[in-house]
Image: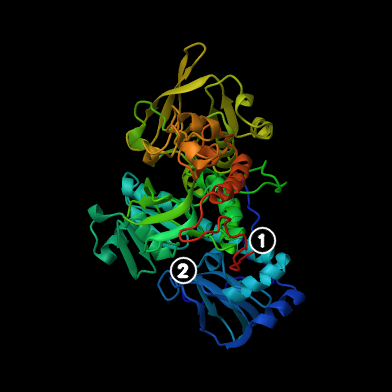
């Protein structure tokens, strides 16, 4: 179908959204706001007018987004697969609408093509011009941000973007799917075992099944079993500089603690770099809804909270790089060098460890062969969409398990919440318990442990045992979501600084007690509250021993850590300088207020 033959529904009647889940219709209309006359006038002061003709391409799929377009007259179609046999129209924008989604704000490549359907006019602004405007007008900034977030969610739900072709039993296929899902990249998985499209694509590109997984985009770009870094480069995710970078503060990890720290540090003028091994947001970024986050009375998804945090940090000039897998921390001439898996390194005056924690693997017979196919340690839309008609089980008694159970219940007819303890109230917030008890598709089984998982290639059932009576039963489920305790991401720090018996980073008085004799006397101070056994290296959030495993507390610790960074830098002058205090004038680079 060509873009000119297509007859999509036009504005002002909103297009029917593609149904994402069988039990509820999501509210997506915030993705397509119409600008007011006043907002159009503001944009016109900065932008330039351009005449367009039918067939003019304004945004091309696969090319970096660098321009903000507002439709003044005529209409512009948003097309996936433009110029290919699979071309189809996703949306049509009329006067008063603007083009762009989240990739515009992050400098990523476009996941669609925008092409004029009829003669008209558009207003053209650079991203820098847009930044200046939205900084002055937070209402406009929030409108643009919400629309871009909503449009990215729609692209993800529609399976737009690149395709991953591979076997569900392949570890590399699972790795690529997880990386794409965690980074909220629009893509579609083509299952080598069950999808008829897979064979046709392999023939078209002359690839044997054993050479998969493949990443295919626009039928012109093919990557054979790419690394996460290669996929990131294709999409335009921010990369580490090839040269050895230097900064005032290096933040390792980009969950709520790391992003909050980046916002505060960069806004106070510190040269701030954030590195992340997998995806911004950490565990919080995979949460479908966080209802007890301060300032969001109607709740907020982990993805939206993450994107807002990233944009706010970059607004003040922080750089965020994904993926960057830290492998070593070395003291070096009063500073610290962090080395990465690709051989690069960054040297900084101070380091904040905010690598968070991961859910512990469930160790029961038969589970390893099913991990990544029907046993999952996160609950995003990608995993949930595989469970549309089958019952599933969620293991865990904390907030993450409760949120996952409620989220997956929107996709599947039955969810069993398996809890080892006697009471949900021991580790779960009351608001979640109330929702779980009221939900007709969620059934809670207390005093319950999994003893074995059944299934050769996909999960067929789980064997359960009652911890009080020893009674056993078999539960027929087709997917298992595991949220049982947290293991810190600190393997790379072992032997470098003090950890507790579970691997979490010791800070404050506990760290000082484990420090080398005379260390803090030489610093002429005590170990600061969030400081580790290395002066100038701090820890915040879930990775820290004794921390409260909640989003709000992680955000607070991240912000508080910057106070201690300033105090440390007051004792540590910059190389070649006699001035102790760090810079406090915020950088002028800005995005959304």
Q: x and y percent of residue 420 in the render?
A: 52, 22
Question: Quadrant of the rendered structure where residue 117 is?
Answer: bottom right
Question: Quadrant of the rendered structure where residue 525 is?
Answer: top right
Q: Real-space Cα distance between discs 1 and 2?
A: 24 Å
Total of numbered circles in the picture?
A: 2
Between 287 and 219, the one nearer to me in the picture: 287
Q: Secondary structure at mark 1?
A: helix
Q: Residue at x 32, y 34 (%)?
A: 456
Q: x and y percent of residue 451 in the render?
A: 41, 22
Q: Are marks 1 and 2 in contact (CB under 8 Å)?
A: no
Label 1 vs label 2, nearer the camera:
2
- Judging by the rendered image, the residue that carries numbered circle 1 is 29
Q: Residue at x 64, y 58 (%)?
A: 28
Between 99 and 427, the one nearer to me in the picture: 427
Q: Quadrant of the C terminus?
A: bottom right
- Judging by the rendered image, the residue that carries numbered circle 2 is 109
């Amino acid at each position: 179908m060509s873009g000119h033959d297509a007859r999509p529904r036009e504005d002002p009647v909103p297009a029917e959204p593609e149904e994402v889940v069988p039990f509820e219709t999501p509210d997506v209309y915030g993705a397509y706001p119409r600008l007011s006359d006043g907002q159009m006038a503001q944009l016109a002061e900065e932008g330039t007018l351009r005449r367009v003709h039918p067939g003019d391409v304004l945004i091309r799929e696969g090319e970096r987004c660098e321009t903000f377009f507002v439709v003044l007259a005529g209409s512009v179609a948003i097309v996936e697969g433009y110029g290919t046999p699979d071309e189809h129209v996703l949306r049509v924008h009329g006067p008063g609408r603007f083009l762009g989604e989240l990739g515009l704000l992050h400098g990523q490549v476009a996941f669609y093509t925008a092409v004029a359907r009829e003669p008209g006019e558009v207003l053209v602004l650079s991203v820098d011009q847009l930044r200046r405007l939205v900084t002055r007008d937070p209402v406009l900034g929030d409108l643009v941000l919400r629309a871009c977030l909503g449009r990215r969610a729609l692209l993800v739900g529609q399976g737009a973007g690149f395709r991953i072709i591979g076997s569900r039993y392949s570890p590399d296929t699972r790795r690529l799917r997880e990386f794409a899902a965690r980074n909220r990249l629009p893509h579609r998985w083509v299952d080598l075992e069950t999808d008829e499209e897979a064979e046709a694509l392999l023939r078209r590109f002359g690839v044997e099944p054993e050479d998969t997984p493949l990443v295919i985009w626009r039928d012109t770009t093919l990557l054979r079993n790419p690394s996460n870094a290669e996929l990131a480069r294709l999409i335009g995710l921010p990369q580490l500089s090839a040269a050895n970078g230097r900064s005032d503060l290096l933040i390792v990890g980009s969950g709520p603690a790391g992003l909050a720290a980046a916002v505060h540090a960069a806004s106070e003028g510190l040269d701030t770099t954030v590195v992340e091994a997998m995806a911004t947001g950490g565990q919080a970024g995979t949460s479908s809804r966080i209802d007890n986050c301060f300032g969001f009375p109607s709740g907020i998804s982990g993805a939206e909270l993450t994107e807002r945090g990233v944009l706010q940090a970059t607004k003040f000039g922080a750089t965020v790089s994904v993926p960057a897998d830290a492998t070593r921390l070395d003291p070096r001439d009063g500073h610290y060098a962090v080395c990465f898996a690709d051989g690069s390194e960054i040297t900084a005056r101070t380091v904040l460890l905010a690598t968070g924690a991961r859910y512990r693997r469930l160790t029961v017979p038969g589970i390893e062969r099913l991990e990544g196919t029907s046993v999952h340690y996160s609950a995003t839309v990608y995993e949930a969409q595989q469970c549309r008609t089958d019952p599933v089980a969620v293991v865990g008694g904390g907030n993450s398990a409760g949120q996952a159970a409620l989220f997956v219940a929107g996709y599947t007819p039955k969810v069993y919440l398996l809890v080892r303890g006697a009471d949900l109230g021991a580790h779960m917030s009351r608001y979640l318990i109330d929702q779980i008890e009221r939900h007709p598709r969620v059934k809670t089984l207390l005093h319950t442990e999994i003893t074995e998982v059944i299934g050769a290639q996909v999960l067929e059932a789980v064997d359960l045992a009652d911890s009080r009576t020893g009674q056993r039963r078999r539960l027929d489920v087709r997917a298992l979501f595991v949220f049982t305790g947290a293991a810190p991401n600190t393997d790379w720090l072992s032997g470098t600084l003090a950890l507790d018996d579970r691997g979490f980073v010791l800070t404050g008085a506990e760290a000082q007690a484990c420090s080398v004799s005379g260390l803090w006397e030489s610093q002429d101070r005590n170990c600061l509250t969030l400081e580790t056994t290395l002066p100038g290296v701090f820890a915040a959030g879930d990775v820290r021993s004794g921390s409260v495993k909640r989003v709000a507390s992680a955000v607070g610790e991240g912000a508080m850590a910057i106070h201690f960074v300033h105090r440390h830098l007051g004792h540590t002058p910059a190389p070649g300088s006699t001035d102790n205090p760090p810079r406090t004038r915020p950088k002028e680079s800005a995005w959304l207020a």
